[in-house]
Image (spheres, rainbow, N blue to C red):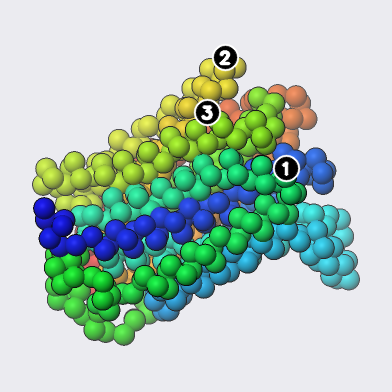
């Protein structure tokens, strides 16, 4: 009854964020799904693929530092537009990676650098362009969520739009291998990459800041700001965008808690996203087409975690806890769930569906964790600093991803050489299982109780 009285337009904005995140992960996952065939065509080692994947993660991490500040400066509408244009172009450019790599190789040879294969160089360049654009997605989406939702609804809204990552991960394995089989791997990058330009039409037609949004009722606008400090909210809207220095933000424990949590756990998601197709090939002998259904099922399980994880803190908030304290209690429970991944290797020899389901539960926990850790930023920081703090944490998460990817590539090359690849994946799965509990303990130590920032 209340929902129909106050209006629901904020959920339309949430839907736009959901579809943008879906497209983001569709574009991101094309390469990992084509890795089993591309490594045969171009003679890649696992360390070559790790270098290509790590390039994306490293550039993504660097770009996140600036993406948040750019979003804060340009505003959500224009900032999101530039982000999706860049990443869509980057996705399409993969289709011409070989000639680009050849040109890069010639340039490098002029300055005395040799031995870089055209395919590796070209895909590294393409991933770098993709990374610059994709870095804008989460800072923009989190900022839009803070603009359109009261604090008590933000983790749920974040969980919904963040589930787009899982939908993208489900759609990719059931579409990319078929497109590649029918029209070639280049067509897969072009077709999937072009979807972002369709989304832009709806974004420009439907999004405005809440105070300028004609489709938003006065009742819904009041509801959006109902649990924020009214004077601070008014000041944020009236004042021009202020630049908050990284130095000042890094002086707060709240920034470090978010940053460490991202560093420890983002790499787990990157690892599964980029290496699961390789795992299914290496240990279970699957082809890109035969792994489509297992991956689709795995990421369907993951999507459940994103939405329910965003809802879970409400259980504690309704019992009287602050949004932050309720979130941290929920995150402790969530941090225990990935421990089931420790069972994937011991029981995986019986049937490949056992690790698929167990890893799916672990990645579901990651998405539940992700929905909540993002929302801790909007719980504690004013709107003008959200993009920058998300960018700092995203940088740390990206660097954690680089370390995980490089470690995985080195381990897999080594254990393939000694004909025991299972050991390499066992080591990586163990790291993935324990990362969330370590992250939660450190975050809780840094910020034991709810302490919002009021002096920025």
Q: Position of residue 78 (x, y in %)?
A: 44, 76
Disc on res. 356: 3
Near mark 1 (Cα within 10 A), the count class, few <14, some 14-19 or many ≥20, is few
Q: Which of the marked residues, 2 or 3, is nearer the chain's N terminus?
A: 2
Residue in the picture at 73% in, 58% down: 95
Instruction: Name the image quarter holding the C terminus.
Output: bottom left
Q: Which of the marked residues, 2 or 1, is nearer the chain's N terminus?
A: 1
Residue in the picture at 63% in, 37% down: 277
CA gap between label 2 and label 1 equals 30 Å
Element marked by disc 3: helix
User: What residue is pinned by disc 2?
Assistant: 350
Q: Position of residue 167 (x, y in %)?
A: 47, 46
Element marked by disc 1: helix
CA gap between label 1 and label 3 equals 24 Å
In this view, the residue farthest toward the front is 182
Q: Which of the marked residues, 1 or 3, is nearer the chain's N terminus?
A: 1
Disc on res. 181: 1
Residue in the picture at 58% in, 40% down: 174
Closest to the observer, 203 or 244: 203
**In-image side of 386 versus 263 (left or right):** left
Residue in the picture at 58% in, 22% down: 352
Q: Position of residue 58 (x, y in %)?
A: 60, 58
CA gap between label 2 and label 3 equals 12 Å
Q: Position of residue 136 (x, y in %)?
A: 48, 66
The quadrant where residue 361 appears: top left
Near mark 2 (Cα within 10 A), the count class, few <14, some 14-19 or many ≥20, is few
């Amino acid at each position: 009854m209340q929902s129909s009285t106050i209006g629901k337009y904020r959920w339309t904005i949430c839907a736009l964020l959901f579809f943008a995140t879906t497209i983001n992960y569709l574009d991101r996952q094309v390469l990992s799904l084509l890795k089993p065939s591309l490594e045969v065509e171009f003679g890649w080692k696992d360390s070559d693929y790790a270098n290509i994947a790590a390039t994306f993660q490293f550039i993504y991490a660097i770009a996140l530092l600036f993406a948040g500040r750019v979003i804060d400066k340009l505003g959500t509408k224009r900032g999101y537009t530039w982000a999706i244009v860049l990443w869509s172009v980057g996705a399409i450019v993969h289709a011409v990676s070989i000639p680009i790599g050849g040109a890069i190789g010639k340039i490098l040879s002029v300055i005395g650098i040799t031995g870089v294969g055209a395919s590796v160089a070209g895909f590294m360049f393409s991933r770098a362009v993709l990374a610059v654009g994709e870095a804008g997605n989460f800072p923009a989406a989190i900022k839009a969520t803070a603009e359109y939702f009261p604090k008590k609804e933000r983790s749920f809204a974040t969980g919904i739009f963040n589930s787009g990552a899982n939908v993208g991960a489900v759609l990719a394995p059931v579409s990319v291998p078929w497109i590649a089989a029918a029209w070639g791997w280049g067509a897969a990058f072009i077709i999937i990459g072009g979807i972002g330009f369709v989304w832009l039409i709806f974004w420009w037609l439907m999004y405005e800041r809440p105070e300028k949004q004609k489709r938003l009722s006065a009742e819904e606008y009041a509801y959006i700001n109902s649990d924020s400090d009214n004077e601070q909210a008014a000041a944020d809207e009236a004042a021009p965008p202020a630049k908050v220095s990284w130095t000042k933000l890094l002086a707060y424990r709240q920034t470090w808690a978010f940053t460490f949590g991202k560093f420890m756990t983002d790499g787990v998601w990157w690892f599964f996203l980029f290496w699961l197709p390789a795992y299914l090939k290496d240990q279970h002998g699957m082809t890109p087409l035969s792994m489509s259904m297992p991956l689709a099922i795995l990421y369907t399980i993951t999507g459940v975690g994103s939405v329910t994880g965003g809802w879970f803190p409400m259980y504690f908030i309704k019992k009287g806890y602050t949004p932050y304290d309720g979130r941290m209690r929920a995150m402790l429970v969530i941090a225990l769930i990935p421990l089931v991944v420790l069972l994937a290797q011991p029981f995986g020899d019986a049937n490949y569906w056992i690790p698929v389901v167990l890893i799916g539960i672990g990645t579901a926990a990651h998405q539940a964790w992700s929905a909540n850790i993002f929302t801790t930023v909007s719980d504690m920081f004013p709107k003008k600093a959200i993009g920058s703090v998300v960018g700092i944490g995203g940088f740390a998460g990206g660097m954690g991803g680089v370390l995980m990817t490089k470690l995985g590539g080195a381990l897999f090359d080594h254990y393939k050489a000694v004909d025991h690849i299972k050991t390499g994946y066992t080591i990586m799965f163990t790291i993935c299982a324990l990362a969330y509990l370590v992250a939660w303990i450190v975050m809780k130590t840094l910020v034991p109780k709810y302490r919002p920032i009021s002096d920025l």
